[in-house]
Image (spheres, helix red, strand yellow):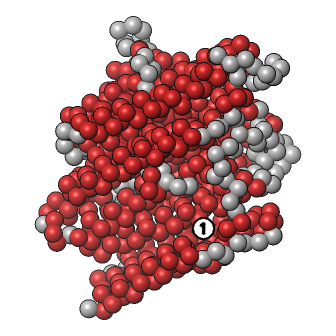
Amino acid sequence: MMLKAYMILSIILFSIGVVGLISRRNIIVIYMSIELMLNAVNLSFVAISADLGESSAQVISLIIIAITASEAALFMSLFVILFRNKASLDANLFDMLGDKK
Amino acid sequence: MSNTFIALAVPALLLLSAIFILLFGLSSYYTKNRAYYITLATLFIAFFISINGIGVLHSAEILPQIFNSMIVYDTFSATFISLFLLGGFLTLAIAKSFVDKTNFFTHESFVLFLLSLFGMVILTMANELLTAFISLEIASMSVYILVGLNRDSLKASEAFFKYLLLGSFAASFYLLGMMLIFAQTKSTNLDVIAEYILNTDLNSQLLVVAGSMLIMITIMFKIAAVPFGAWVLDVYEGASLPITAYMAGVFKIAIFAFALRVFLKDYITFQAIYDPLIIGGALITMAVGSLLAVIQQSVKKMLAASSVVHSGYLLIAFASTGEATSSAASAIIFYLFAYFISAIGAFGVLSYISKGSDNLINYDDLNGLAKERPIIAASLTVFMLSLAGFPSTIGFIGKFYIFTSAIEAGYTFLAFFGALSAFISIYYYFKVIVHLYFKESGHLEVDYGYKVSLAFIVISALIVLWGGVGTSLLLDIPGINALNALSKYSLESLGL
């Protein structure tokens, strides 16, 4: 019964992440939305693990945290590169690519 | 060599070599040039270790006590591992001039190159969703950085931004899908999931269906199928040419290898639910890809857009795997051979004649190349013919198998639309040939140097031709029949 509630919470968090990623313009907020999506998945893994009474799902969620951390490192370097080039983190400013030429 | 040894030695070699270059790359002795040759030597040795595993039917879990049945080494993975290593080797060997003339190709780029190959090698051997995800992320993260290698270029950093952002967005769908599958089957192992799917009524496993759809979204994203592939043109444009070749030629094949394994092992049971989606995806992918390729002004972006069309052809075969499993799946593997060598060759020629500059190569830049450099022009023509699916090249045979399998599965209209988009593709591929041979050149003769790179381009062109006409009746060099047997074997080993 509790598992269902946790799953619904996790799906809501995931959806908030998706909406945030689509609607926000600041790249740091976009990154936070991605983190929210990944942690929503983590939450339900932990809930499943508690429901089953075994720890394999918790191991999965630990591994996901490690992957998220390495992704965070990439995003930090991305912020530095983008800010150095345009002195702003507004996603709409980065529209050079995409012309036909 | 025992199979366990091959399966462990190839990734270990790649990883150790990457760590070695990373540690010693800063010393003055291990210059960029030395790092380059160490990388090439690693790929060469690893390739010769891994081809011992192809052509023989085998399938075994590697060290089941340690890896808990997560890693499987079979003919399928052996074939694809050899393909990646060959692709990585050819990409780097052709890109020699690019590496020399640019200053952003430092020793770290070779480390990332080796690490991404390591990820792909594990990805094809992964028999478990989480292992596959970790290796997919190892490979993708290295490729993200390779895209943004040129930190001073606005375009490259923008491509890095778009690819990283959308890539992590897609990856989170994979995790969500894996979570749903785990919630129902209590396992992430592909064999266990397959058993669960077979033994359970379709209506009571909705979570598995939904989860595998979400995983398919990530796969579709990575192979740049249309609704999810909006990044592909921008990223291919922003990345430097060798990296574009690497992404289009090698990375895409790694994703297809994983997709094929997941598909044939697990999803094939509920093919009926998938088929309409994949058929729709294939049609849109081919239509939009063709449209994008026709309107491009630069050859690099045209090739990027046409790689979307090739994903569409492969999706046709994916849709046919339900009805005509063996012929469609081996058609996919054969087509991957064909596309891989042609794409690496075509992008390789572009990177060779761009001489490390950041400029996009427009059609006009190719004017009169046939007069000045007949060998390069001839090789590029061969690659274009192969990509367009012209008879006597490997691309024709690949398309032939794909369309045959579609007809065999009863999807004649898919074969028709495939042929139609192949027909449209003649326009943009032959435009290159027209500019090569029938336009007057406006610029002076240039010496490109780097005869070794040229030699590898010519070798790739010869492979393309030999794959189209060669049989063992003529000469004792593996040709069409050998490639065919290879794809049949690797397919059969999945069922073991």
Please determine whether, in this image, residue B176 is positioned above or below residue B137: below
Query: Does the rendering let one see residue B55?
Result: no
Please determine whether, in this image, residue B180 is positioned above or below residue B458: below
Give the residue displayed 33% in from the left and 37% down from the top. B417
| Residue B347 falls left or right of residue A59 | right
Query: Does the rendering let one see residue B277?
Result: yes
Give the residue displayed 71% in from the left and 13% down from the top. B371
User: Which residue appears farthest toward the bottom when viewing the image?
Assistant: A2
Kindly state the secondary structure of the residue where label 1 is placed. helix
Residue wearing tag 1:
A71
| Residue A88 falls left or right of residue B41 | right
Task: Identify the image quadrant of residue B183.
Answer: bottom left
Task: Tell me the crowding category of disc 1: few under 14, some 14 to 19, or many 20 or more residues within 10 angstroms, Cα based.
Answer: some
Q: Which amino acid does label 1 sit on?
A: Glu
| Residue A54 falls left or right of residue B224 | left
What is the x, y in percent for residue B123?
Answer: 45, 52
Closest to the observer, A79 or B120: A79
What is the x, y in percent for residue A36?
Answer: 52, 80
What is the x, y in percent for residue B347?
Answer: 61, 34
User: Which residue appears farthest toward the right when viewing the image?
Assistant: B28
Closest to the observer, B389 or B111: B389
Please determine whether, in this image, residue A49 is positioned above or below residue B249: below
What is the x, y in percent for residue B433?
Answer: 59, 22
Q: How many marks?
A: 1
**Quarter containing the N terminus of chain B:** top left
Give the residue displayed 37% in from the left and 58% down from the top. B216
Give the residue displayed 50% in from the left and 23% down from the top. B385
**Quarter containing the C terminus of chain B:** top left
Name the subunit of mark 1: A
